Image (cartoon, helix red, strand yellow):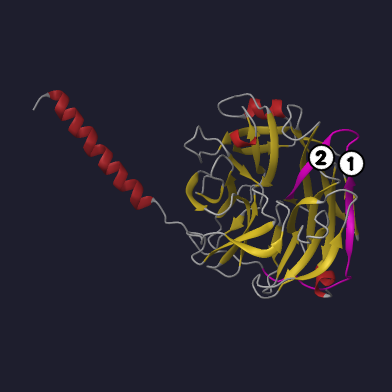
Amino acid sequence: MDTVALAILALGAMSLVLGAVAIRRDRPLCWQFALPAPLPATGEGRFETVLDYRPETGQAHAPAILPRDGGLSVVWFEGSAEAQPDVDIRGVDLIRNGDGWQVSDPAPRLTRAALGRALEPRQLVVTLGNTVAHEAMPGRFFATVVSVGGWAMAAIADVTMSPAGPVTARKLDLSPILNRSFLVKSPMLAYADGSHALPAYFEMGPTFGALVRFDAKGRVRDRRWMRSRRAKVIQPMIVPLDARRALAFLRDFDRSGTLWLCRSADGGQSWSAPEPTSRPNPSAPVAALALGDGRILMAANDDATAPDALILSISGDEGASWREIHRLSGPGALRYPMLRRVGDAIALVHSTGGKRGIAAHIMSASWLAAR
């Protein structure tokens, strides 16, 4: 056997050995959800509006909640119009101050130019979109980034932030189509071992929902799909029912007028085919949150006679039925809600006036308990 053949065999053997070592060291993913503790229903029952922001010109849309010490940050994308080349991420900080909240002035948080310099490799950023907190890595968040084309050519960037702006950023490796057409909207899910998953969605051609799992270093480890042959479902909002079961509420991109639902019974490893629910929906995302006591809180546009109103409702039977507890109305459409626990309270944010502003509300557990 000549030297070249021996070298090839040696390299092959080394590859097999290294592969075996990697497999042995690779920890299997945990597929059991972490469940929230019930909110303590103590103190005064309060529902208060803590932010009502409208830019002088253009649009402000798709707010997200980023938890922080002593409160939260609310961020959104703002510019002349959605998907335009002057859109950046702006935001405010809300800090608890006694019985009230101190709100900072709106300011840029992530600009296209700064993100383009931070991306590895460095690249042009044409516009920015939906943003969610990176629950597993404090000081980081996921942003929807477009380097060419529109939303169908977007990618998800994992951005490490400092007070001065982005430090580093990289696009998640999710799609074989030039790593394009994946976007984010809903908060991450926590698992019992401390790991997390990111709900995402694919928006080019056969749209579908996705659940993205990460390893301890924040690299994509696994991807699971929520596909439908009956509807173009996007923006999955996932709510665990117990350690293994979960519901995923999905928006129909084809405007069927109905909210869609799929289920998992194995911690998110597989999902049933999405089915239409009886809940009206004007092709708009919903927000939902497990309250830790068997109930689910939802914010949705689910009144067919008032599709611009944002309605808070509660289910005590795992989403089989819903009871309205509060209604928010315009002027203009209220859309793109997000719900998050903030200490012993719950925050709700949403767009106002048909993408013309941002509102944030804080509701206490006592207020919810009285509903």
| Among numbered discs 1 and 2, the one appearing first in the sequence | 1
| 345 sits left or right of 35 in the view | right
Residue ID for mark 2: 60
Vertical order, 153 against 103 (above or below): above
Q: Secondary structure at mark 1?
A: loop
Q: Position of residue 157 (x, y in %)?
A: 61, 37
For the residue pair 227 and 37, the one nearer the viewer reads as 227
> Is 42 a magenta residue?
yes
Vertical order, 175 against 189 (above or below): above
Outermost residue, left direction? 1
Q: Secondary structure at mark 2?
A: strand
| 83 sits left or right of 353 in the view | left
Mark number displayed over residue 348: none
Where the N terminus falls, by quadrant? top left
Q: Position of residue 137 (x, y in %)?
A: 61, 47
> Is 107 a magenta residue?
no
Q: Quadrant of residue 346?
A: bottom right
Vertical order, 167 against 260 (above or below): above
User: Residue at coordinates 80% horizontally, 69% vertically from top-left?
Assistant: 324
Q: Position of residue 239 (x, y in %)?
A: 63, 63
**Dot 1 surroundings within 10 Å: few (below 14), some, or many (20 or more)?**
some
Labels 1 & 2 near each other (Cβ < 8 A): yes
User: Residue at coordinates 83% horizontally, 45% vertically from top-left?
Assistant: 354
Where the C terminus falls, by quadrant? bottom right
Residue ID for mark 1: 54
Q: Which residues are magenta?
A: 37-66
For the residue pair 346 and 295, the one nearer the viewer reads as 295
For the residue pair 328 and 108, the one nearer the viewer reads as 328
For the residue pair 182 and 197, the one nearer the viewer reads as 182
Residue type for callout 2: Ala
**Dot 2 surroundings within 10 Å: few (below 14), some, or many (20 or more)?**
many
